[in-house]
Image (cartoon, grey):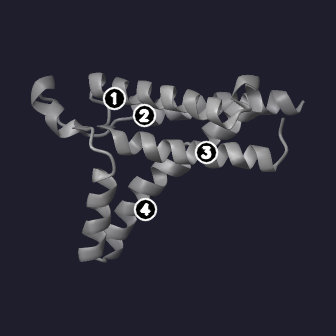
Amino acid sequence: MKRKLLWTGFSAYVITMLWLLFIRSRGIAVTDYWSQLPGRVNLVPFSSMGSMLRTLWHNPYPAVLWTVIYNIGGNIVMFVPLGFFLRSLFPGCRSFRRCMGAVFLIMSTIELCQLFTLRGFCEVDDVLLNLLGAALGWWLAKWMKIP
């Protein structure tokens, strides 16, 4: 019964994430691919996070704080369930290192899909924050003693 519930939760999570990442409308103007590409790729680690935190430091307003929380916190929180479900459902992901390797491959694939479809931004910072979220989920599942 517990495994069936975990699989149901995992399925709902995957469907929700696919919708959030690739399907929902973002109201982005449609122009040609190559003109949009430079503003949608960031391969410099910590540059997006640093930029947001610097902006918050110089403009400590609620709207700026909310934007930082939404972007940084959202990238962490949205992937806590991934680490939780991977450790709980896939025996190969019971090892922290193997689970984080799987998450890295999943996140890199998602970022590349976002790059090629222009459905979001392809950023190294997203992968790092998503890994942190998945690590928290892995530790949560271990703490809860879910096999």
Q: Position of residue 83 (x, y in %)?
A: 64, 38
Residue in the foreground of this view, choosing between 29 and 109: 109
**What is the distance, in whole Å, between disc 4 and disc 3 at their CAs?**
19 Å
- Residue type, mark 2 in image: Leu
Residue 80 in the image: above or below residue 51? above
Residue assigned mark 4? 69
Cβ atoms under marks 2 and 1 closer than 8 Å? yes
- Residue type, mark 1 in image: Gln
Q: Mark 2 vs mark 4: give the one in front.
A: 4
Residue placed at 37% from the left, 45% from the top? 125
Q: Which SS class for mark 1?
A: helix
- Residue type, mark 3 in image: Ala
Can I make out residue 1 in this image? yes
Query: Which label sits on residue 114?
Result: 1
Q: Quadrant of residue 141 in the image?
A: top right
Residue in the foreground of this view, choosing between 51 and 71: 51
Residue assigned mark 2? 21
Residue 15 in the image: above or below residue 67? above
Residue 11 in the image: above or below residue 136? above
Residue placed at 9% from the left, 30% from the top? 35
**What is the distance, in whole Å, between disc 3 and disc 2 at their CAs?**
20 Å
Quadrant in which the N terminus is drawn: top right
Residue assigned mark 3? 135
Q: Earlier in the sequence, mark 2 or mark 1?
A: 2
Q: Which SS class for mark 2?
A: helix
- Residue type, mark 4 in image: Ile
